[in-house]
Image (tube, helix red, strand yellow):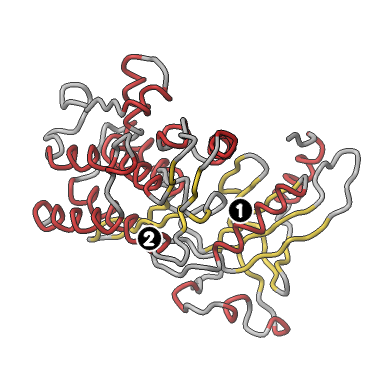
C-alpha cells in the first residue's frame, strides 16, 4: 500500500487552501487537519449552510444530540486503493448503522466517490465519513500529556471512564448477533472534559468490528483468524487466542474483555500492561500476552501517589486471563465496576 508524494501534496494543498467538500447534498469547509493514519485523514470541517440546503445535514439525524451548535464536525477521508479496502469501508459503514448509544461514536453521514486514477494517484475511490467532533483528543493523547506532567487520573475518574466504555461495549455485545469491536484501546477512546464531572468517554473506529462468535474447526481456519487479527487488532491489546488460535475452539466477545482489561490498566498507567512490562525488562510481547504476565507500577517507580486501590489491580487481572473461557462477560464486569464506583467514588 503506497501513495505518491505528489498525490498527497495535492491533498494537502486542497486542505491548506480551505477547500470545500461535499458529502451528498451538504457542503463543508475544511478548517484544519486533526490527524492521520495509513490512508485516512481526519479533518475539522464546518458546514456551509445556504437556502438551497434545506436545513443542512442535521435534518438527517435521528438523535438531536448529534446536531452541532456551531456547525463543526469531524470528517474522515479515506483513500481507497483496491476492492478489499472498499469492502472494509462499506463494512464499517454497515456496522455503524447497527447501533445507537451515547458511548459509541455515531456515523452521521457518508459518501463513497469513484475517482479517476492518474500516474501520481494510486487510489480508485475516496470515502468521506462525517462524525461529531471531540476536540479534547483520545485517551491515548490525554495519557501522553499527563505522563509528561507526571499526572494521573483520580480513582473516581478511572472508574467512571471505564464504566462508560463498558456501557458502549455492552450495546455491541448484545446486538443480534453479538458484535465485537476488536480494537478496544486508548487510541480509539475519545475523551471530552466536563467541568465538575468525569470526562465523557466515547468508543470509536468500527473498522474492525465483526460478529463476535466464530467456530474454529481446522488449522487453516485458526491461521486465517490469526492473520486477520494481525492486520486489524492492535498487538498490545490483542487477546491470546488471537495470537495463537487453537484448531478446535469457539471465539466469542470475550476477546474484547481482554482488551478492556488492558485498557483499564492503560487508563491508570498510560500503556497496556504488556507494553509496560516489556518497557521494564524487554522480551517478546506475544509471549508476555500468552502468559498473562502483568507488572504493577509502584509509587516509587513512577506510579501515582497514593497508589490506586488493590481492588483495581484485581479487577484488571480478572479480565486479563489468558484462558478465554474463564474471563467474565461484559454484564459481570458492569456489576463489578458499579460496586467499585459505589465504594471509591464519593
Given residues 231 and 118, the one toward you in this image is 231
Within the image, what quadrant is residue 218 found in?
Answer: top right
Q: Secondary structure at mark 1?
A: strand
Question: How many other residues sit within 10 Å of disc 2, few (<14), some (14-19) or many (≥20)?
Answer: many
Q: In this picture, is 175 found above or below 229?
A: below
Query: Which is more foreground, mark 1 or mark 2?
Result: 2
At x 39%, y 47%, the residue is 256
The percent position of residue 163, horizontal first and vertical second, equals 27, 56
Within the image, what quadrant is residue 121 found in?
Answer: top right
Q: Find residue 148 and name its label.
A: none
- Give the mark nearer the N terminus: 1 vs 2: 1
Q: Find residue 43 and name its label.
A: 1
Q: In the rendered view, does 80 fall on the left or right side of 326?
A: right
The percent position of residue 261, horizontal first and vertical second, equals 30, 42
The percent position of residue 251, horizontal first and vertical second, equals 44, 46
Q: Residue furthest right?
A: 119
Q: In this picture, is 133 found above or below 247?
A: below
Q: Secondary structure at mark 2?
A: helix
Reading the image, the residue beneath label 2 is 168
At x 49%, y 35%, the residue is 247
Q: In the rendered view, does 130 fall on the left or right side of 320?
A: right
Given residues 311 and 34, the one toward you in this image is 311
At x 38%, y 60%, the residue is 168
Q: Quadrant of the C terminus?
A: bottom left
Amino acid at each position: 500500500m503506497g501513495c505518491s508524494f505528489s498525490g498527497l501534496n495535492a491533498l494537502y494543498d486542497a486542505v491548506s487552501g480551505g477547500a470545500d467538500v461535499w458529502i451528498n447534498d451538504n457542503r463543508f469547509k475544511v478548517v484544519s487537519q486533526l490527524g492521520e493514519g495509513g490512508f485516512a485523514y481526519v479533518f475539522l470541517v464546518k458546514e456551509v449552510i445556504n437556502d438551497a440546503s434545506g436545513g443542512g445535514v442535521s435534518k438527517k439525524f435521528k438523535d438531536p444530540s448529534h446536531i452541532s451548535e456551531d456547525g463543526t464536525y469531524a470528517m474522515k477521508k479515506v483513500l481507497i486503493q483496491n476492492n478489499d479496502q472498499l469492502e472494509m469501508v462499506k463494512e464499517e459503514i454497515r456496522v455503524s448503522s447497527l447501533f445507537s448509544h451515547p458511548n459509541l461514536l455515531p456515523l452521521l453521514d457518508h459518501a463513497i466517490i469513484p475517482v479517476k486514477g492518474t500516474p501520481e494517484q494510486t487510489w480508485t475511490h475516496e470515502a468521506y465519513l462525517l462524525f461529531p467532533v471531540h476536540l479534547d483528543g483520545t485517551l491515548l493523547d490525554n495519557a501522553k500529556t499527563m505522563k509528561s506532567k507526571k499526572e494521573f487520573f483520580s480513582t473516581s475518574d478511572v472508574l467512571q471512564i471505564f464504566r462508560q466504555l463498558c456501557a458502549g461495549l455492552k450495546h455491541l455485545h448484545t446486538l443480534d448477533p453479538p458484535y465485537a469491536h476488536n480494537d478496544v484501546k486508548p487510541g480509539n477512546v475519545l475523551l471530552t472534559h466536563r467541568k465538575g464531572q468525569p470526562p465523557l468517554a466515547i468508543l470509536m473506529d468500527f473498522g474492525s468490528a465483526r460478529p463476535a462468535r466464530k467456530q474454529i474447526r481446522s488449522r487453516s481456519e485458526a491461521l486465517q483468524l490469526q492473520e486477520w487479527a494481525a492486520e486489524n487488532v492492535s498487538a498490545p491489546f490483542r487477546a491470546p487466542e488471537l495470537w495463537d488460535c487453537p484448531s478446535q475452539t469457539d471465539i466469542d466477545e470475550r476477546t474484547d474483555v481482554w482488551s478492556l482489561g488492558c485498557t483499564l490498566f492503560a487508563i491508570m498507567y498510560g500503556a497496556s500492561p504488556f507494553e509496560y512490562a516489556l518497557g521494564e525488562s524487554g522480551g517478546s510481547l506475544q509471549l508476555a500476552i500468552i502468559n498473562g504476565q502483568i507488572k504493577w507500577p509502584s509509587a516509587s517507580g513512577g506510579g501515582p501517589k497514593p497508589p490506586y486501590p488493590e481492588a483495581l489491580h484485581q479487577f484488571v487481572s480478572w479480565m486479563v486471563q489468558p484462558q478465554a473461557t474463564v474471563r467474565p462477560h461484559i454484564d459481570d464486569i458492569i456489576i463489578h465496576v458499579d460496586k467499585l464506583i459505589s465504594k471509591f467514588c464519593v
